Amino acid sequence: MRPASANAVIHITRNKQHKIKDDDVDVVATVGLGPNGAGGFVLTAALDVTLAGVDQPTAEAIVADAHKTCPIRMRRAAMSTSR
């Protein structure tokens, strides 16, 4: 199963100069659990994204664009504003 963020990278770049294919994306997720400051816990996640065939500045721009449209990020924002 491909993480949602990788799908976002592929979707974001589909109509741009640098086309990213499924096999060009590698995502390693590190997930943790930490205190939330209110006596509970919060889920943490860090993604290490590798895009084959593009230079570092281009890869960073693509991942930044993907982060803006990430469904998990949007879901988290919606949850925090609805409480």
Image (spheres, rainbow, N blue to C red):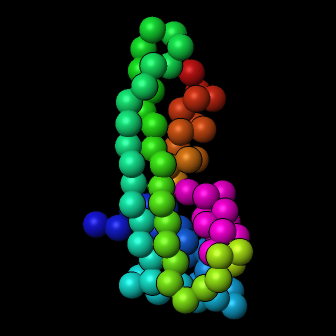
Would you say 48 lies left or right of 67 here?
left
Q: Residue at x 39, y 54 (%)?
A: 29
32 vs 7: above or below: above
46 vs 18: above or below: above
Asked if residue 39 is among those painted magenta in the image, a careful observer would answer no
4 vs 36: above or below: below
45 or 5: which is nearer to us? 45
Asked if residue 60 is among those painted magenta in the image, a careful observer would answer yes
Q: Position of residue 15 (x, y in %)?
A: 65, 86
Q: Can you say which quadrant of the picture contains the N terminus?
A: bottom left
Most frequent secondary structure within the magenta stretch: helix
Which residue extends farthest front?
56
Q: What stretch is highlighted in magenta?
A: 59-70
69 or 47: which is nearer to us? 47
66 or 31: which is nearer to us? 31
Q: Residue at x 53, y 32 (%)?
A: 79
Would you say 41 lies left or right of 69 here?
left
Q: Can you say which quadrant of the picture contains the C terminus?
A: top right
Q: Position of residue 28 (x, y in %)?
A: 39, 60
Q: Where is residue 13 in the image (x, y as percent from the top left)?
A: 61, 80
Residue 15 in view in this figure: no
Would you say 54 lies left or right of 43 here?
right
Q: Residue at x 64, y 83 (%)?
A: 55
Residue 52 in view in this figure: yes
